[in-house]
Amino acid sequence: MVKRILSYIQQTEVIQSASVLVGGTVVAQAIPIALQPFLRRYFEPADFGYYSIYISIIGILMVISSLRYEQAIVLPKADSDSVKLVNISLSISLIFSIILVAIALLFHTSILKILSLPQDRIYILFLIPLGTFLFSIFQVYNYWLIRKKKFKSISVNKFSRRAVEGVSQSTFAITKYSGGLVLGDVIGQLVNAVVSFYQSVKCGYRLQFVNPKDAGRLLREYAVFPKVNLLPALMSTICFMLPVVFINKYYSAEEAGYFDLSKLILSVPLALVASSFSSVVLNKTADCYRNKKPFIGEIKPLIWIVLAMSLLEVLIIVLWSESLFTVIFGDKWLVSGEISKLLVFPYALNFITSSFTSLFVALNKITWQSVWQVFYFLMISTLPFLSGLSFENFIFAYTTIEVVANSTMIVLLILLVKNTNEARD
């Protein structure tokens, strides 16, 4: 039986590619996860609450930092056009980050009030533009490496970031610097950007000027990404990242910290596997689509793996969450274990959808995804109206919204695959 399974893996390219990415990502993500019991005992829940706000804002800004042109890097037939798209995306992101610095300088007092951040956390506002640009560099080069099928290089990049981030945050924890979580993340992102650039150069990329004529041609050719996908993608990311900001504003930084830990642990399959699977699905499906070949057989093994992992996560959390959180992180994190019993359901569904949403890009059907993202945003936008609820009831309402939204996305993915196959027949 074992030999048959190993033989199947060796003969299935999509699993081999995914295994390289997942293996590297598991090693990389194991570092911050393994450090959590240590960090959670040195930093207070409020420190993690503020750190989560920083991460959430960067996650939102990342969507618009290069106007979504980075997603088009995998699509051109000629590598020369892809290289130009890389450089165009980096230029747009740099300009965007400079604008963010100007906004932080001019309106920092108002922004602190809106986010309910104390004055001693003002450094977060000025690290956000840098963090956004550094992460954008990685994101852009990541798509180039996906195009070149350099999945091992992507794994090395992720490991470099997490290793340096882990060492930095641990050092700040020992020195009892409360801002160490944010600063350690920035240091890790800096290393990630440098290593990603080096890996991309090894794979044929060149940092060079793009003449206005070529830039205009490519911006027009792939204008569908900012025109159709930018606003809906921003809405979708806001939906995922903004709840922690709401919790900090309407409840407390401590409760935002409890939510942050639940989100971190429940997102382990998402962080370890989903992005890797999504990259492989994008590469394989785009290849099949360009060459007018069937693709469902290529990704079917990943579907079964994702479903099995989702079910396993739900069972573990529902049965043992409180015990696991208190034993591993300490008694002060019991609340995280309690709310995880609810949150595990939307996170399991989100793991499934995140693994396969790249199908919309690969099959050139991003309009479908955009419609859903608007629907998702409208549902999440009701959360501020629920701020009068207790924290526990607020989490229940948020869970219900997420389950409905992710279930709808699964239905949409099934319809996309079905319609594409029928069109090819």
Image (cartoon, helix red, strand yellow):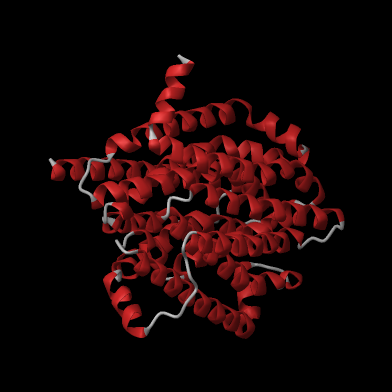
404 vs 381: above or below = above
Instruction: Give residue 186's quadrant in the image.
Output: bottom right
One can see residue 189 in this view = yes
288 vs 119: above or below = above
Instruction: In this rendered view, identify the residue nearer to me: 14 or 419.
Output: 14
- Judged from this view, the residue extending furthest toward the top is 1
Across and down, in percent, residue 102 comes to 58, 84
- Figure label count: 0
Residue under the point 23% across and 40% down: 294
One can see residue 68 in this view = no
Instruction: Give residue 27's quadrant in the image.
Output: top right
Residue under the point 75% across and 32% down: 327
Instruction: Quarter of the image for the C terminus: give it.
Output: top left
Across and down, in percent, residue 131 comes to 61, 67
Across and down, in percent, residue 311 comes to 47, 29
Across and down, in percent, residue 220 comes to 28, 75
Residue under the point 82% across and 61% down: 177
Instruction: In this rendered view, identify the residue nearer to me: 74 or 124.
Output: 74
Residue under the point 40% across and 35% down: 302
- Judged from this view, the residue extending furthest toward the right is 175
307 vs 64: above or below = above
Q: Position of 121 compared to 151: left or right?
A: right
Q: Position of 246 compared to 4: left or right?
A: right
Instruction: Quarter of the image for the N terminus: give it.
Output: top left
